[in-house]
Structure formats: C-alpha cells, structure tokens
Image (tube, rainbow, N blue to C red):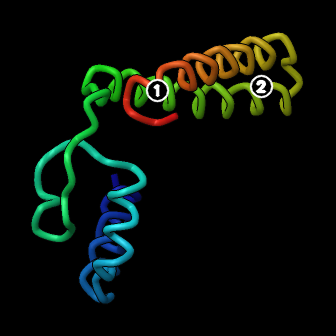
Amino acid sequence: MIGVALTTAVWLGVTFATAPTDTETLQGFYDRIRPFGRGWERVVQVGETPASGSVSAALTCWGLGCAVVYAALFGAGYTLYGQAGLGALFLGVSALAAVGLFRTLPRVGFE
C-alpha cells in the first residue's frame, strides 16, 4: 500500500507541476487512435466516428491486447526461470491473442 500511495503521489505531483500537452499533440493522438468516450471535445476537434467503429470490438481488442502483453511477460518469465513448458504455453497464448487482436482491429476502424 505504501508503494501505491507513493507512486500515486509522485504521479499527481508531476502531472500538476508540468505544462499541459499542446493541442497539436492531442489532436494527433485523437486522429490516430480515435478513442471512444466523452471529454475530447474540449481539447481537440472531434470528427465523425467511423461507421465501422464498434464499442464491443474495441473492448475485445482491449482484452486481447492485455492478454498479449501479460501472457508474453509470464511466458518470458517462466522461460528465463527454467520452466520451458509453461513458458511455451504462455507465449503460445500470447501469439494466439495477437492473431485475434489483429483480426479484430478492422472492426474498430483500423486497417
């Protein structure tokens, strides 16, 4: 708990002590990622949401992306600590999740 509190305090301190990101950078991020949700109208020029964009597909991509990262981390860790079987299993799960992710991305509007 001390680690979480310390990390949060430092994160908030740096956030409030530094200058905000310029509008051009935020607009570039928005145009490339096209995040769902409210709140962007205040800082960027929000365009039309692509017709192919789907919230359920975006959530699926989010879950698959998390699976790719965590399974790859566990796979690398198990492999480094000499448990090759579990390492291969997790790396395989990571690869399958990556395939699913790249197949789902067009449903969100990325090609």
Mark closer to the chain start, 2 or 1: 2
Q: Which amino acid does label 2 sit on?
A: Tyr
Residue drawn at the location 40% of the way across and 23% of the way down:
107
Q: Which amino acid does label 1 sit on?
A: Pro
| Residue 84 % position (x, y) | 87, 17
Residue drawn at the location 67% of the way across and 34% of the way down:
73
**Up/down of 31 relative to 80, above or below:** below
Are the residues flagged by discs 2 and 1 in contact, CB closer than 8 Å?
no
Give the residue at mark 1: 106
Q: What kind of element bears circle 1?
A: helix
Q: Which of 75 and 38 is in front in this view?
A: 38
Q: What kind of element bears circle 2?
A: helix
| Residue 63 % position (x, y) | 42, 25
Residue drawn at the location 25% of the way across and 27% of the way down:
55
Q: Residue 78 carries which label?
A: 2
Total numbered labels: 2
Residue drawn at the location 73% of the way across and 25% of the way down:
75
Whether residue 97 sits left or right of residue 22 in the image: it is right
Whether residue 76 sits left or right of residue 20 in the image: it is right
